Image (cartoon, rainbow, N blue to C red):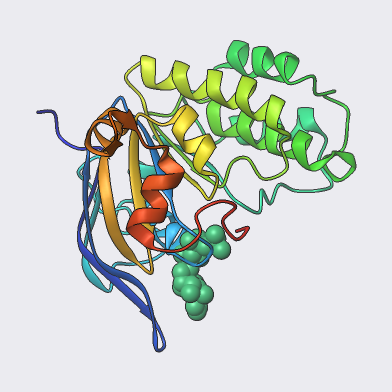
Amino acid sequence: MADPVIQLSSLSRRFGQKTALDDVTLSLPRGVVYGLVGANGAGKTTIIRHILGLLRAASGTVRVFGMDPVAEPVAVLSRVGYLSEENDLPAWMSVGELIRYTRAFYPTWDDGYAEELRRAFGLDPSARIRDLSRGQKARAGLIVALAHRPELLVLDEPSSGLDPIVRRDILGAVLRTIAHEGRTVFFSSHLLDEVEEVADHVIIISEGRILLSAPLAEVRERHRVDGESLSLDAVFHALVGTPASPLPLG
Ligand code: ATP
C-alpha cells in the first residue's frame, strides 16, 4: 500500500489535568475523504492542530507526507489546504485582496480554479470580508484553502455557518472532486448526517480515544439489525453511549 498521508502513532496529549488525546494511532492512505466525528471537546481540533504542526507531539509521533510537521512546516504546509473552525480571515481585506494575498504563498496556486470557485460561490471580489455572512466567509475560506490544489485538505467543522442546501451541494461536490483526483480530505464534524453523506471513511473519537476507524461501507456492513444497516447516528450512539444527535455544538 502507498505511504500514508497522515500517520499518528500513540499520540497522547494532556492540557493540565485534562487528557485531550489518549494513545491515538491512525494510518491514513491518500485519495480518501476522512470524516472525524465526535462531540464537543472530544479531541478533534487537538488532532488537527498536531497534523498542522501547531502543536508538538508531547507523547507519540505525527507524520504528514512522511515528515514531522513541526520540524518541516514549509514542506508540509505548502501541500496542505486548511479551513479553520473560526475561519479567521483578515476582516479588512476584500475578497479579491484575500485571493491575491494568499496566492503569493503558494507556487501551485491555480488562478483559473480560484476564479471558478469565486463565481460558483457567488462572491463579489470587491466585498469586504467583514461584511460577509458566516456562510460567505466559509466560502471565501474554502477558496483560499482549495485554489493551490493541496494534496491534503484539512477542514475543522467546515459546515458551521453554511445552511444545509449550500453545505450539501458545494461542500459535497468539492470534497468528492478532490478525493477523485487522488487527493485526501480530513474533516472534523459533529454532524453525523454530514459525515455519512460526504465521508468514505469514518473515525469516531470520544474523550480523546479513537473508538472506530473504518470505511463507511464496512461500518454499515458490520452494524446491522434484522438485515438493515444502522445509521451512523445509531452506530455512534452504541459506541459512545450518549445521545448522538444532535451532538453538542462545537
Ligand atoms: P469542539 O467541537 O468543541 O471544537 P473538539 O473535539 O475539537 O471540540 P478539542 O478542542 O480538541 O475538542 O479539545 C479537547 C479537550 O482538550 C477539551 O476538553 C478542551 O477543553 C481541552 N483543550 C483543548 N485545547 C486546550 C488548551 N489549549 N488548554 C487547555 N485545554 C484545552
Looking at the image, is 91 positioned above or below residue 60?
A: above
Query: In which quadrant of the rendered image does the C terminus lie?
Result: bottom right
Front residue of 8 and 68: 8
Residue occupying the point 29% across, 28% down = 217
Give coordinates of residue 51: x percent, y percent: 36, 52
Residue occupying the far bottom of the picture: 17
Residue 100 visible in the shown view? yes
Residue 52 visible in the shown view? no
Front residue of 237 and 4: 237
Looking at the image, is 171 positioned above or below residue 211?
A: above
The quadrant holding residue 120 is: top right
Give coordinates of residue 58: x percent, y percent: 28, 74
Residue occupying the far front of the picture: 226
Q: Is residue 85 left or right of residue 55?
A: right
Looking at the image, is 94 positioned above or below residue 171?
A: below
Front residue of 203 and 177: 203
Residue occupying the point 50% across, 59% down = 243
Residue occupying the point 26% across, 45% down = 213
Give coordinates of residue 109: x percent, y percent: 53, 23
Give coordinates of residue 76: x percent, y percent: 34, 43
Query: In which quadrant of the rendered image does the N terminus lie?
Result: top left
Residue occupying the far left of the picture: 1
Q: Is residue 86 left or right of residue 208?
A: right
Residue occupying the point 35% across, 55% down = 238
